[in-house]
Amino acid sequence: MLVLGIETSCDETSAAVVENGRHILSNVVLSSLEQHKPYGGVVPEIACRHHAELIDAVIEGAFLKARRSIGQIGLIAVTNRPGLIGSLLVGVSTAKGLALANDIPLVGVDHTWAHIYAPLMGESATRFPFVGLVISGGHTDLLFVKDFDEYEILGRTTDDAIGEAFDKVAKILGLGYPGGPVIEKLAKEGNPSAIDFPKSFLEPESLDFSFSGIKTAVLYYVQEKNKFQTANYKLQITDICASFQDTVIDVIIEKAIKACESKGSKLLVVGGGVSINLRLRERLRKECGKFNVKVYFPMTQLCLDNAAMIAGLGYHLYKKGQRADLGLKVYV
Ligand code: KG4
Ligand code: ZN
């Protein structure tokens, strides 16, 4: 079965054609990131307009690249949650129009879930249950995943998401938006042990996260250093990046391993924009290896928001009997 996936939850306008939930024929992603940069974060109105202007061309591009046409599509899968309401509405309205005009079934997909499905797209079969970890700009969720449509929330952030922490720390350091890529790059030249930023683990057994404290700690550190600015300040920025990055990675590692232990799982599946970070990948793999926990990450092009993972998960939801109609709603 060929599935057309549509994703417009945030600043990426994306469409994909995927066969049987796993074989990606095309995955076109057009980001409005450059237009948000001057504002230091995603501006919902700009994102929404970008989707409205480009969604038709992106879908056409996905068909051209896949060498397929709408007549060959057996299902349309669209992100209907969570995300920016105006942005979601563009994708969902387009999907409804295409489904109605071409008499194609429709399913709504939770894009957080799709982030967990993304690492599994290269696998021939999915082995449930496992522990899932979503680390993105909007989420830091630990889940116990029992099936494509069944999961238990083990922990989530009580304040900022991890990607949000990268973005806010980058803003404090004047490094622009988004923060993740630039912090990862500068961290390579810094000393991760240079600064002892606080790690927030909350209650001893808690699997919830908190990242707002470290952001404030970085802010105070920078304000203090600015009072005595020295010639090697640039060097200190690399140290701040490396120390911040390793501090949040330490927390992620500890909680992820604790979640696997509590559920007796030897499989950890990690997705979302922050999972592209190579330092995180390397350290998480190494530490999980000590507990015989195998870690799956998505291939690079499936880390950030994209429609291939939506089409992929949508296929399985359809097989499990899910159907949406023209009443499909969007949720923040
Ligand atoms: O999954 P995503 O595209 O959007 C959401 O669903 O939120 O994730 C975007 C987030 C941003 O916060 C961005 O700073 C972060 O992913 N990110 C990174 C890296 N690249 C992107 N975080 C850490 N290291 C990176 N290399
Ligand atoms: Zn996302």
Image (tube, rainbow, N blue to C red):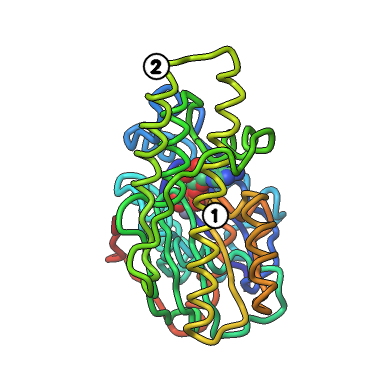
Label 1 residue near ligand 1, CB within 8 Å: no
x and y percent of residue 144 in the render?
Answer: 46, 79
Camera-side residue of 44 and 272: 272
Mark 2 neighbour density, 10 Å: few (under 14) some (14–19) many (20 or more): few
x and y percent of residue 180 in the render?
Answer: 54, 40
Instruction: Please tell me which of labels 1 and 2 falls first in the chain.
Output: 2
Camera-side residue of 285 and 46: 285
Q: Is 8 above or below relative to 74?
A: above
Q: Quadrant of the N terminus?
A: bottom right
Q: Could you tell me if residue 63 is visible in this image?
A: no
What residue is shown with label 2? Answer: 227
x and y percent of residue 113 in the render?
Answer: 46, 67
Quadrant hosting residue 11: top left
Camera-side residue of 244 and 151: 244
Q: Which mark is on residue 249?
A: 1
Disc 2 is placed on an element classified as helix
- Left or right side of 300 for 307: left
Q: CA distance from mark 1 to mark 2?
A: 29 Å
Looking at the image, which residue is at 59% across and 59% down? 308
Give, as a three-letter code, the residue at label 2: Lys
x and y percent of residue 94 in the render?
Answer: 41, 52
Q: Quadrant of the C terminus?
A: bottom left
- Left or right side of 122 for 28: left
Label 2 residue near ligand 1, CB within 8 Å: no
Tell how many labels: 2
